[in-house]
C-alpha cells in the first residue's frame, strides 16, 4: 500500500515545489487537481487531454522523484444552475477523464 496525498493544500506552490514538499514527507502517490472550481495551477484538464507536451510536463517531474499519480482531481458543481458555468465545469470534468485515459 502507498500513502497518497491530495495536492489541494499545496496549490500555493508551483508543481515541482509541491512535489518536493510531498516527497520530503515520504509520500509517493499524489492527486494533482485542477478544473471545476479548483484553480488550474497544477493541472489544466483541457490542456492535459489535448496535449502530449502538457502530459509530459505533468509526468516528468513525478518520474524524476520516483512518484506516481493516484488520481486526477477535478471538483466542481457539475449541475450548476448557471448554464455557462455548468458547461465550463462539465467540460473540465470530461477533459480530466480523457486525460486520465491518456495518462494510463
Image (tube, helix red, strand yellow):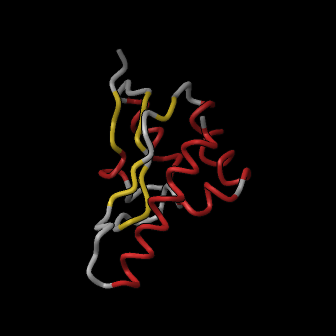
Q: Position of residue 31 (x, y in %)?
A: 40, 41
| Above or below 69: residue 2 | above
Along the viewing direction, whichever of 1 and 12 lies nearer the viewer: 1
Q: Position of residue 86 (x, y in %)?
A: 36, 76
- Where, quadrant-wise, is the C terminus in this rendering? top right
Along the viewing direction, whichever of 39 and 51 lies nearer the viewer: 51
Q: Position of residue 64 (x, y in %)?
A: 62, 31
- Where, quadrant-wise, is the N terminus in this rendering? top left
Residue shown at the point (40%, 66%) measured from the top left = 39
Residue at the extreme top:
1
Mark count: 0
| Above or below 47: residue 87 | below
Residue shown at the point (54%, 44%) measured from the top left = 100
Instruction: State the image quarter where residue 47 is shown.
Output: bottom right
Residue shown at the point (38%, 59%) measured from the top left = 12
Q: On the picture, is 28 further left or further right than 82?
A: right
Residue shown at the point (40%, 70%) measured from the top left = 89
| Above or below 66: residue 41 | below
Q: Position of residue 10 (x, y in %)?
A: 36, 51
Amino acid at each position: 500500500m502507498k500513502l497518497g496525498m491530495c495536492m489541494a493544500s499545496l496549490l500555493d506552490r508551483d508543481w515541482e515545489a509541491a512535489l518536493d514538499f510531498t516527497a520530503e514527507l515520504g509520500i509517493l502517490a499524489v492527486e494533482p487537481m485542477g478544473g471545476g472550481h479548483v484553480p488550474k495551477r497544477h493541472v489544466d484538464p483541457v490542456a492535459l487531454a489535448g496535449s502530449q507536451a502538457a502530459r509530459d510536463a505533468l509526468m516528468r517531474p513525478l518520474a524524476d522523484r520516483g512518484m506516481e499519480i493516484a488520481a486526477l482531481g477535478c471538483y466542481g458543481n457539475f449541475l450548476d444552475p448557471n448554464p455557462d458555468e455548468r458547461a465550463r465545469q462539465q467540460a473540465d470534468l470530461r477533459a480530466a477523464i480523457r486525460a486520465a485515459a491518456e495518462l494510463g
